[in-house]
């Protein structure tokens, strides 16, 4: 389940390549030659998918969750990824700055502080992308993002935790890859990936006061992240600290080797390096063409 500004494009590249290596039928938008969003921001329905010769076995495009996903993939392994909600909201503010709630504000921390002087006023500006200005993960997961009732939030959080087989944590990405490898019996090739869509504003410093405002405004996403992080910490403890350290070292060596190999003129055009380097749109287009050729 792809979320926004959480390293999900990097995870998507990993899953698309996993699907190709294991001959899975990958579902992409029927308009995939022009667009990488699977009907988003509308709720997913199976008619949004490109027709394929065999039933779809993997979906990793941007969707807004609906029960139709369970109809298309009734026995699927379910993975998503979350990010520290403060970092994610700051990233949303800069990356989606042209959406109505943000566009009239200075593209700076000062602009972000101005937003939180009257967040409801800015959020009320309806247009495409408005959902990025509050609880964007809850929106992607099919819930209302303008939710404030704490008991209702906790209920939906527990429903989400129960639904997914594993929730990756963006700010602990390499650890997440190792746990995915362990849980699903993958090999090193399955978790080899290069970063995609990395923002240029990732290391900005904000005040404690602004951090509190972001968490409060995004209460649903903050609650979900905290709950998922608890489970993640348990999984790390069970895996073992020393073992994790060794596995991460191995992963980074293999990643560095692949990056060096893919940077040489000889290997740049290899299929593996091409796929590792694909953007989200390019990979969606590649799969769309493959599906069409196989039909």
Image: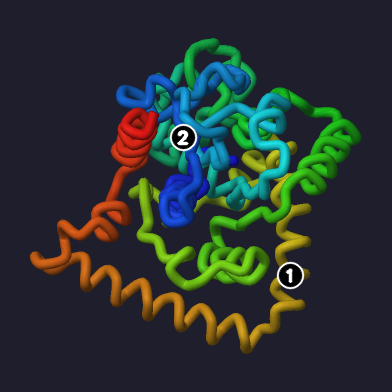
Task: Name the residue rendered at 48%, 43% in the picture.
Answer: 5
As helix, strand or loop, the secondary structure at mark 1 comes to helix
Q: Is residue 24 visible?
A: yes
Q: Dot 1, how many residues are within 10 Å of its Cα: few (below 14), some (14-19), or many (20+)?
A: some
Task: Name the residue rendered at 52%, 36% in the picture.
Answer: 113
Image: 238 above or below 32 = below
Image: 219 above or below 252 = above
Task: Name the residue rendered at 74%, 37% in the picture.
Answer: 220
x and y percent of residue 265 in the render? 9, 65
As helix, strand or loop, the secondary structure at mark 2 comes to helix
Q: Is residue 205 left or right of residue 150?
A: left
Quarter occupied by residue 184:
bottom right
Q: Is residue 209 left or right of residue 267?
A: right
- Nearest the viewer among 210 and 71 is 71
Viewport quadrant of the C terminus: top left
Name the mark on residue 235.
Answer: 1
Q: Which residue is mark 2?
A: 93
x and y percent of residue 27 in the render? 49, 34
- Nearest the viewer among 38 and 54 is 54
Q: Is residue 148 left or right of residue 84?
A: right
Image: 251 above or below 54 = below
x and y percent of residue 243 in the render? 62, 86
Measure how far apart labels 1 and 2 are at the Cα level: 32 Å
- Nearest the viewer among 195 and 13 is 13
């Amino acid at each position: 389940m792809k979320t926004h500004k959480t390293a999900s494009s990097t995870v998507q590249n990993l899953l698309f390549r996993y699907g190709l290596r294991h001959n899975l039928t990958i579902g992409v938008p029927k308009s995939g030659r022009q667009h990488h969003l699977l009907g988003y921001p509308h709720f997913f329905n199976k008619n949004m998918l490109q027709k394929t010769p065999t039933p779809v076995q993997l979906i990793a495009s941007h969707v807004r969750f609906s029960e139709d996903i369970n109809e298309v993939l009734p026995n699927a392994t379910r993975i998503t990824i979350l990010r520290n909600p403060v970092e994610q909201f700051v990233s949303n503010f800069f990356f989606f700055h042209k959406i109505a709630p943000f566009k009239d504000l200075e593209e700076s921390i000062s602009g972000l502080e101005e937003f939180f002087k009257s967040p409801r006023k800015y959020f009320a500006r309806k247009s495409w992308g408005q959902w990025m200005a509050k609880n964007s993960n809850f929106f992607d997961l099919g819930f209302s993002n303008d939710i404030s009732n704490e008991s209702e939030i906790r209920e939906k959080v527990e429903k989400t935790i129960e639904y997914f087989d594993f929730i990756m944590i963006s700010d602990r990405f390499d650890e997440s890859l190792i746990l995915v490898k362990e849980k699903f019996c993958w090999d090193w090739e399955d978790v080899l990936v290069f970063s995609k869509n990395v923002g240029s504003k990732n290391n900005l410093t904000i005040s404690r006061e602004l951090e509190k405002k972001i968490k409060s405004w995004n209460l649903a996403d903050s609650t979900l992240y905290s709950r998922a992080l608890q489970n993640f910490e348990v999984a790390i403890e069970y895996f073992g600290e020393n073992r994790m350290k060794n596995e991460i070292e191995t992963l980074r060596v293999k990643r560095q080797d692949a990056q060096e190999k893919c940077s040489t003129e000889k290997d740049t055009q290899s299929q593996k390096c091409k796929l590792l380097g694909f953007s989200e749109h390019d990979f969606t287009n590649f799969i769309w063409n493959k599906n069409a050729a196989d039909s």
